[in-house]
Image: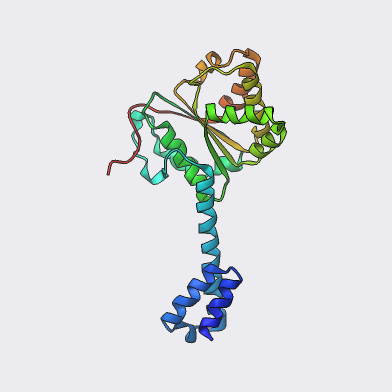
Amino acid sequence: MEHQIEVKLKQLHLAGMAQAWQTLVQNRQHVELSLNDGLELLLQREEEDRKNNRFHRMIRGARFRYQASIEEIIYDAKRGINKAQISSLATCQFLKKGESILITGSTGCGKSFLASAFGHQACLHGHTVVYSNTQKFMQKTKMARTDGSIMKYFDKIAKVSLLILDDFGLAKMDQQQQFDLLEVIEDRHGKTSTIIASQLPAASWFDVMSESTVADAILDRLVHTSHQIELKGETLRKKR
């Protein structure tokens, strides 16, 4: 009978419950628990299993540059790492408010690591995340425009809870790229969140975007309503 129950749970794709039932049987606990207690335990395990599987799917789908986490951050005020600010952002309340984060600093100071850590934290809280190098993101946008799927692509990106654009400003954008970026930012403004990591301070982004009106519009929607982190020094990854 015990084996038949396990088989039936697996057939119904209740993997978490099946594993919990197997453990109960092995420990002979299934004969000691009441029906209510046993059912509660099985349901709790199934819920945890599904949440865990969803989290790992989201992590794989996001394609982070680093497998980073908030716990690995070294707090140092001299390097621009404010523990109170990071702890506040780690609650992911900024996502619920549709707020953005700008991370700036020189090469090797840990911008990508910190952005990945925020993305990882967002996945833990059940939010969808897309992580991309800015140039690759703009190339995908160009391809979508070429094959006629640009509006579908914009709609897809607009629905993502957190968009992370890394290495922003390494190359100048042509006119169409600037308008496409504005479209993306406009669709997300006040609704979903964006993290931009750049070697350039926000004031220098005009050098990357030749269309001053477009640059003004993008900065207006990002800079004035964002959480800003200016990093200094080398990598933030925890020494082991």
Residue 37, image x and y in percent? 53, 78
Tell me where residue 136 sits by quadrant.
Answer: top right
Which residue occupies 50% across, 50% down? 124
Q: Is residue 91 visible?
A: no
Q: Nearer the viewer, residue 62 or 230?
A: 62
Which residue occupies 62% across, 26% down? 181
* 135 lies above or below 128: above
Side of 187 where 5 appears, left or right? left
Q: How many marks on residues? A: 0
The C terminus lies in which quarter of the figure? top left
Residue 218, image x and y in percent? 61, 23
Residue 25, image x and y in percent? 46, 81
Tell me where residue 235 sits by quadrant.
Answer: top left
Residue placed farthest to the left in the image?
240
Which residue occupies 48% across, 72% down? 19
Q: Is residue 234 visible?
A: yes
Q: Nearer the viewer, residue 10 or 156?
A: 10
* 123 lies above or below 43: above
Which residue occupies 55% across, 61% down? 50
The N terminus lies in which quarter of the figure? bottom right
Q: Nearer the viewer, residue 148 or 163?
A: 148
Q: Nearer the viewer, residue 29 or 135?
A: 135
